[in-house]
Image: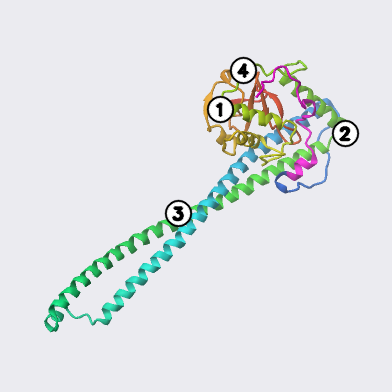
Amino acid sequence: MAVHRRSPLSGAHALVRALVLTAAATTVLGVATGGTAQAAPGSPDTPSGLKDVKAQVEQLYDEAEQASERYNGALDAQQRLQHQTGDLQQQVAVAQDELNQLRGDLATVAGAEYRGGGMARTAQLMLSADPEGYLSQARTLDQAAERQNETMHEMVTRQRRLDQRRAETSAKLAELDQTSRSLAESKQQIQQRLATAQKLLSSLGAGERARMAAQDAREAEQRATRGTDRLDLGTTPPASERGAAALAAAVRMIGSPYVYGSTGPRAFDCSGLMYWSWRQAGVTLPRTSQAQAYAGRQVGISDARPGDLVIFYRDMHHVGMYAGGGVIVHAPYPGAKVRYESVNAMPLAGVIRL
């Protein structure tokens, strides 16, 4: 990958933190938020009122992203549990068939013994016209009895395994049920916060929204360019060829929209962009930012190299990719698009090298 140095800030003027498009709010997870726009308390026409709306919207987006990462984690767990439960249920069915077969074999032997009259073996030998033949048959019967005992032992062992598999299946089904409830709860939280944010934004007039968008665009560009009109990513090389490939993939997605729960190739959430970009480099990351924080070894921010993951906030609910020069590329929030951003724009939790 060619390392960018003092390259133009691609698309920074269009990346707006506070202005979420109605489509972004209503298409998330495929559920419309609905509701009629109504005026929010206070006067958004004043600078202080506009600032208050902006702060509330940013807080709502932050809470929605936290819920989104919980949703991503629950969805990943649900898919894993569904696979595990299916495997266990198949194992239970096979084990039950094998156990039924063993029981059938034992029943056949027991029926044959019953029809033999149950006469003591000594009496049978005394009455036999062919003692030598009888002794030969008795040895065969002893061998058959031994095999029968082995079969009974195997049946008991298989019954225990079957009971264990059934218990594991029940536990997995209970866990799956809990995960599904968590999934629904996180989804509802995302929708509620996006709907509230959209309602707040709709309370502003067109002029207020434009003013807030322009202010946010200026702030974003200043953070990434340090007040200049150009982006300097420095000359530090990536830590690996795969890191270079992942960064190149992420940079190609600059301008793509942020959509909760998306992993590309046309829309992303924060961890979804990392997941997709590293997949292009042949590496499969965990799905959530919290899990990605443990996908490699931690390094200091002063040692960060292009391609490293940069984790933000104490609960690690946001992630970006280091691009060099104190800049990351990330998917910020609804209404914004994948863009460059200063690594200092959010509270840093750690830098992860894969």
Asked if disc 1 and disc 2 are in contact, CB closer than 8 Å, the reply is: no
* Callout 1 crowding tier (Cα within 10 Å): few <14, some 14–19, many ≥20: many
Q: Which mark is residue 352?
A: 1
Q: Amino acid at mark 4?
A: Thr
Amino acid identity at mark 2: Ala
Tell me the kind of residue under disc 1: Ile
Give the residues drawn in magenta, as a range.
Answer: 1-27
Label 1 vs label 3: CA separation?
A: 35 Å
Q: Give the Cα distance between marks 4 and 3.
A: 50 Å
Q: CA distance from mark 1 to mark 2?
A: 42 Å
Residue 118: x and y, percent? 22, 80
Whole-number angstrom distance, CA of label 1 to CA of label 4 = 16 Å
Where in the figure is residue 50, as x and y percent of width and height?
81, 29
Front-most of residues 175 and 256: 256
Inspect the magenta stretch and tell me whether residue 156 lies in it.
Answer: no
25 falls in the magenta region = yes
* 229 lies above or below 12: above
Residue 38 lies, in percent from the top left, at 83, 42
For disc 4, the marked residue is 236
Q: Nearer the viewer, mark 1 or mark 4?
A: 4
Q: Nearer the viewer, mark 3 or mark 2?
A: 3
Discs 4/3, front:
4
Name the residue tied to disc 2: 206
Element class at badge 4: loop
In the picture, the quarter occupied by the C terminus is top right
Q: Nearer the viewer, mark 1 or mark 2?
A: 1
Q: Which residue is mark 3?
A: 168
Label 2: which secondary element: helix
> Which quadrant of the structure image shows residue 350?
top right
Label 1's element? Answer: strand
